[in-house]
Image (cartoon, rainbow, N blue to C red):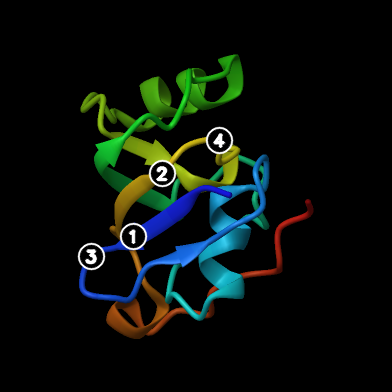
């Protein structure tokens, strides 16, 4: 099982293939996901500190271009299926923005 390390939090293991956004949520990590994990809003962005988050799909690539996200280590957690150990830092949180996190993304 892959291990997820969130900066400033304890590491946890997740089922291989699970969406990163769901893995974070299910372990109490504060992260926004305003569009419900449908790759429309980019609020579930994470910085990949260490590890391989896998290739970007066409949906993530197009949305990143539209939103002007150019850094290769900034990814949408709703589009990452965890297959290896990762160290990440959520970039937008409900507690920092005062926003409702959003509906639970689908598996």
- Residue 59 relative to residue 96: left or right: right
- Residue 44 relative to residue 38: left or right: left
- The spot of residue 93 in percent (x, y) is 36, 72
Marks 1 and 4, how far apart at CA = 14 Å
Q: Which residue is mark 1?
A: 5
Q: Do the numbered discs 4 and 2 sit on residues whose CB atoms are within 8 Å? A: no
Would you call the spot at circle 3 few (<14 residues within 10 Å), some (14-19), or many (20 or more)?
A: few
Quick one: SS at disc 2?
Answer: loop
Mark 4 or mark 3, earlier in chain? 3
- The spot of residue 59 in percent (x, y) is 59, 23
Along the line of sight, the residue nearer the viewer: 106 or 24: 24
Quick one: SS at disc 4?
Answer: loop
**Relative vertical location of residue 67 with respect to residue 59 in this rendering, above or below:** below
Residue, x 71% and y 67% (percent of image)? 104
Residue 83: image tag: 4
Q: Is residue 33 visible?
A: no
Q: Which residue is mark 3?
A: 7
Q: Do the numbered discs 1 and 2 sit on residues whose CB atoms are within 8 Å? A: yes
């Amino acid at each position: 099982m892959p291990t997820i390390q969130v900066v400033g939090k304890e590491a946890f293991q997740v089922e291989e293939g699970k969406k990163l956004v769901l893995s974070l949520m299910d372990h109490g990590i504060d992260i926004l996901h305003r569009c419900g994990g449908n790759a429309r809003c980019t609020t579930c962005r994470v910085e990949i500190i260490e590890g391989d988050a896998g290739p970007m799909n066409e949906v993530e690539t197009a949305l990143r271009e539209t939103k002007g996200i150019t850094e290769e280590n900034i990814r949408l957690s709703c589009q990452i299926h965890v297959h290896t150990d990762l160290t990440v830092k959520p970039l937008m949180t409900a507690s920092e923005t005062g926003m409702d996190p959003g509906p639970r993304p689908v598996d």
